[in-house]
């Protein structure tokens, strides 16, 4: 943004003030009881319940409609593993049992489907009824990880959006005024519904409209053109989120761009970007149609966080760890 456009930025900021309040806090809706001690599974032993103390609270505080994926990551080996659920109720179904055959290194997903508005207590009961068993002649004792990802039906939650990747995404605005670098670090350190946060990466007009509808405030989003220092200036990319893993690093267009694009969509304001080497981060201009502006990292703005397509990290402890042993003298961990 050049000096002649400062007035325009101030105008957008004033309009954005109408929406300045942060999006309601995204609390951790799914709580795993065992956050520090891994489960123990004896090969050919009894089926174990993953977590009989797991709790669930939906976004609206009372009911939930959508799906919950229970994802088993495994290191392979001559071992068969099974995930299933023993809960039964009208409006609930699942695709279990999910079997992973001996020798496979593939993950498998048990999907719990709540096709009608379901009371939180029944969602919780279903989660507490998910079971695991391992059997076979030999094992790989590397730890297994079982993850949980919640996907709320967008028709049931106006803050949910079905993304081009077919997954449900969520968007949160923080009014804390920080630099782009700090905003990105804050976004990546957050997670919701089992998904890792990142500065929003807007790849369609529909996605932009969703943010405008949820919280149309001026703030940082995840674009950058100094991802490789001065040598990358002018080549705009999504610097985080699943888009950053595209073939060309998540490139999107600017006027006159001559580089190879991963994404065709952009929403630059008039004459933007125009900040040359001084403005290398992407600003979402609030109060209008969500147009973009290039802006210097040192400026202090709120920011838009997106959740979707990125699984939470191991450090988030949003998983259940299972250690598998072949010694039948060992017993499954107590307290479940």
Image: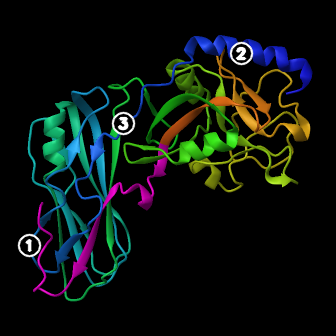
Q: What crowding class fits label 3: few (fewer than 14 Cα within 10 Å), some (14-19), or many (20 or more)?
A: few
Q: Position of residue 99 (x, y in %)?
A: 23, 67
Q: Of callouts 3 and 2, which one flags the residue occurring earlier in the amino acid sequence?
A: 2
Question: Dots 1 and 2: beta carbons under 8 Å?
Answer: no
Label 1, label 3: how far apart the Cα atoms are = 35 Å
Q: Of callouts 1 and 3, which one flags the residue occurring earlier in the amino acid sequence?
A: 3
Residue that badge 3 annotates: 27
Q: Of callouts 1 and 2, which one flags the residue occurring earlier in the amino acid sequence?
A: 2
Using residue 238 as the reference point, say whether residue 308 is left or right of it: left
Using residue 258 as the reference point, say whether residue 94 is left or right of it: left
Q: Quadrant of the C terminus?
A: bottom left
Residue 230 in sight in this render:
yes
State whether residue 103 is above or below residue 268: below
Using residue 33 as the reference point, say whether residue 193 is left or right of it: right
Which one is nearer the viewer's eye here, 132 or 162? 132
Label 3, secondary structure: give it: loop
Which one is nearer the viewer's eye here, 8 or 78? 8
Which one is nearer the viewer's eye here, 113 or 23? 23
Residue that badge 2 annotates: 12
The quarter of the displayed image where residue 62 is located: top left
User: What is the magenta range?
Assistant: 308-336
The quarter of the displayed image where residue 222 is located: top right
Residue that badge 1 annotates: 46
Q: Residue at x 11, y 62 (%)?
A: 335
Q: Quadrant of the N terminus?
A: top right
State whether residue 271 is above or below residue 138: above
Label 1, label 2: how far apart the Cα atoms are = 62 Å
Q: Is residue 317 a member of the stretch shown in magenta?
A: yes
Q: What crowding class fits label 2: few (fewer than 14 Cα within 10 Å), some (14-19), or many (20 or more)?
A: many
Q: Position of residue 43 (x, y in %)?
A: 17, 80
């Amino acid at each position: 943004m050049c000096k002649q456009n400062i007035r325009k930025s101030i105008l957008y900021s004033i309009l954005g003030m109408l929406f300045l309040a942060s999006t309601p806090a995204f609390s951790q809706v799914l709580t795993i009881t065992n956050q520090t001690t891994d489960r123990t599974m004896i090969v050919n032993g009894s089926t174990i319940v993953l977590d009989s103390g797991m709790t669930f609270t939906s976004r609206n505080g009372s009911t939930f409609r959508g799906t919950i994926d229970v994802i088993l990551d495994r290191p392979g080996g001559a071992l068969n593993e099974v995930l299933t659920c023993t809960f039964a109720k009208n409006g609930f179904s699942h695709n279990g049992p999910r079997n992973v055959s001996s020798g496979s290194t593939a993950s498998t997903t048990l999907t719990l489907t709540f096709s009608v508005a379901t009371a939180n207590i029944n969602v919780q009961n279903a989660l507490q009824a998910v079971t695991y068993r391992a059997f076979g002649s030999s094992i790989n004792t590397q730890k297994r990880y079982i993850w949980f990802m919640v996907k709320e039906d967008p028709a049931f939650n106006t803050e949910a959006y079905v993304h081009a990747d077919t997954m449900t995404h969520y968007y949160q605005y923080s009014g804390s005024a920080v630099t782009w670098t700090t905003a990105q670090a804050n976004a990546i350190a957050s997670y919701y519904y089992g998904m890792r946060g990142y500065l929003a990466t807007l790849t369609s007009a529909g996605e932009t409209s969703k943010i405008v509808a949820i919280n149309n405030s001026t703030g940082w989003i995840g674009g950058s053109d100094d991802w490789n220092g001065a040598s990358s200036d002018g080549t705009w990319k999504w610097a985080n989120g699943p888009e950053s893993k595209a073939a060309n690093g998540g490139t999107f267009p600017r006027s006159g761009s001559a580089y190879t694009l991963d994404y065709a969509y952009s929403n630059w304001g008039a004459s933007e970007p125009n900040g040359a080497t001084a403005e290398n981060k992407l600003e979402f201009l609030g109060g209008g149609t969500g147009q973009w502006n290039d802006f210097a990292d040192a400026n202090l703005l709120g920011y838009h966080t997106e959740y979707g397509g990125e699984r939470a990290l191991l450090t988030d402890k949003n998983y259940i760890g299972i250690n598998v042993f072949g010694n039948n003298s060992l017993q499954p961990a107590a307290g479940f």
